[in-house]
Image (cartoon, rainbow, N blue to C red):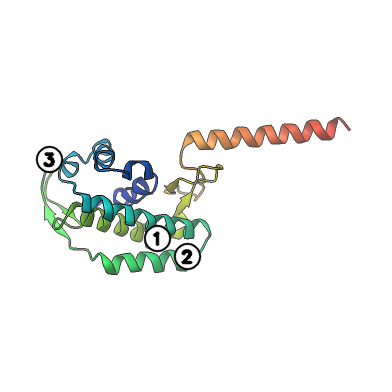
Amino acid sequence: MDLISYAELAVLLVNSPDRLTGLEGLRALLQESGRSRQASRLTRADLDALRALREELVAVFEAAADGNEREVVARLNALLRRHPVHPQITEHDGEPWHLHLTEGGRFADQYVVGAVMGLATIVTDLGADRLGLCQSPPCRRAYLDTSSNRSRRYCSERCASRANVAAYRARKKVGQDSGGR
């Protein structure tokens, strides 16, 4: 079972507040992430539950960005208590038998369990510092640092490039200011 892909559900939700304004936006988000089957059965209750989950996940990523590992763990434990895991063996889409974290309940229940269990696995296997918020102001989008040397600081190459260009320009300006005096 690839729990990192489940953790990516959390990142997707945290980084998509604009998609949670209505069912159509959430359906489009799910379809774009390869979850068309789930998108077709969404309800208003699912949307409301995922909005609430998003706020809780934002707090998890903020605690991680602040280096507050105990708060990250406390928040994830609270979510795990509210949303217990019920593993199921399943097959679909021509895939062989494999495990899913939950098959029953409404879509939001499945999403919550996957996202929270994925984050919990990353925190316990790799550390809370592997959850991050982009350091390119004003971005603050969430990311998972799965690099071997814990070096990720940005949500995307675009933000990394923007930050590097800004740093270069700042160094160049300081050099010009000090050289002209």
The front one of 1 and 143 is 143
Residue flagged by tag 3: what amino acid is it? Asp
Indicate whether 110 appears above or below 83.
Answer: above
Q: Which comes before the other along the chain, label 3 or label 2?
A: 2
Number of marks in the image? 3
Compared across the picture, whether 167 is left or right of 15 comes to right
Residue flagged by tag 1: what amino acid is it? Val
Query: Do tag 1 and tag 2 residues touch (Cβ < 8 Å)?
Result: yes
Query: Which residue was labeled with disc 2?
Result: 69
User: Which is in the foreground here, disc 1 or disc 2?
Assistant: 2
Q: Which comes before the other along the chain, label 3 or label 1?
A: 3
Asked which quadrant contains residue 36, the reply is top left
The front one of 10 and 41 is 41
Q: Secondary structure at mark 3?
A: loop
Residue flagged by tag 2: what amino acid is it? Glu
Query: Which residue was labeled with disc 1?
Result: 123
Q: Residue at x 21, y 41 (%)?
A: 35
Pinpoint residue 83: horizontal percent, then vertical percent: 25, 64
Mark 1 neighbour class, 10 Å CA radius: few under 14, some 14 to 19, many 20 or more: some
